[in-house]
Amino acid sequence: MRLFAVAVMIAVAASLAGCGGGNNSEPPPANMKAVAGDTSATVTWDAQSGLSYWVWIQQGTTIDTRTCTTCRIIPGVTSPFIVTGLTNGTTYSITVNAHDSSGAGGSGSPAMIVVPRLAGSTWTIDPPLGSNRLLGAAFTTANTAGNSELVDVGANGAVFWTNDGSTWTPATSGVTVDLNAVQFRNGLFVAVGGAGTIVTSPDAVTWTPRTSSTTNALTGVQGNGSGQVVAVGASGTILVSSDSTTWAAANSKTSNDLHGIGYGNGRYVAVGAHGTVLTSTDGTTWTTIAPVTDSDLQSVVYGSVAKTSTTPAVATFVAVGASGTLVTSPDGTTWTLRPPITANNLASVTYGTQFVTVGAGGTILTSFDGIAWQPADSGTTTNLNGVAFTILTAKSIGVGYEAVGDAGFNLTSF
């Protein structure tokens, strides 16, 4: 299924609006629905062959394709379609009309009213994916086949994938060790795990083992967006690759276990046991930062989020760990220990439209700035081990998050 991740902005003139409801009009599509998401809405309808469909959006509670001169119009799209770039908390009317080969457009379907809202606060428990612990998740807007995919990995080599957020398919990874983390880099999903295991796949279906120079467990993987990928693991292990397939060891200058790695603003940050923080600008030469805590740090992410539409974005590294430990940094080198944000162990942190962290006992917390956090109701006390930002079509609602945990637990927030 193709993902239209970015909606096309159309300059609307009065004459174009007139085309919305011409005399030679087609009837509006049946079963048109619009469901609000985070800064987005997913629009679906029953399509007929030979017709083209236009999506119309306007602020407020009314919309008319025959008279609207201020609408945002997105022509020639297919169902389902994600309208992006909406403002959370704002009311929108959405309709869809049909066009024949001459370009004449009919009247729109009955308008649907949506109010986009921030994802991460309300969570849905989806059917479990097997019975193994799920440990990591990753999303890509397009794999080598052009599909959007969300992939979960876990204990005993477990792999599951979906391209619609609804139907999950198990895959055979070819390994039986725990797969602790996964990302999509260089046209490949890269999963890392126990005993130095690295497996890759172009489509999440067929997986190939890769040679690594370690037998230590690998626990985190991160790319810089320009081809380089870095994996970290036990006893200070760091492996570096330029293509996700061939890996070489780097000197971390520590024997502490490394649990997570993030990248932002031209810098890698790796975190681990006893408050370990390492930084690197090239993935190969690493510098040890004086720890600001002795607590184990499990995960780190870089984000740049604004509290509101009128406040400037703040760029921040956020690392979380044991007993709700939280440390933050504006640049990856100067770190501040913050008050614990929960008594539970935190396992993973991600960022999309805000920061989201998950952990033991079903803990989920969210934050705009990485400093002030609010608890979210996960609906479970099951340990959550990983969280990922995602955009999917069909049953899923645009921008959102997925959290994974013990016993195949799989939660979504859109």
Image (cartoon, rainbow, N blue to C red):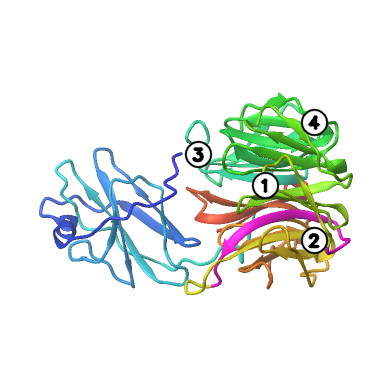
Q: Residues within 10 Å of mark 1 (few under 14, many from 20)?
A: some
Q: Residue at x 73, y 26 (%)?
A: 174
**SS at mark 2 in the image:** helix
Q: Earlier in the sequence, mark 2 or mark 4?
A: 4
View extreme (left): residue: 23
Q: Residue at coordinates 28% horizontally, 51% vertically from top-left?
A: 54
* Residue type indicated by callout 3: Ala
Q: Quadrant of residue 32?
A: bottom left
Q: Which of the marked residues, 2 or 3, is nearer the chain's N terminus? A: 3
The range drawn in magenta is: 292-307
Of badges 4 and 1, the one in the foreground is 1
Residue 79 position, x and y percent, is 38, 46
- Residue marked by disc 3: 142
Residue 231 lies, with reference to residue 55, above or below; the image says above
Q: Which amino acid, by three-letter code, is at mark 2?
A: Gly
Label 3: few (<14), some or many (≥20) within 10 Å? Answer: some
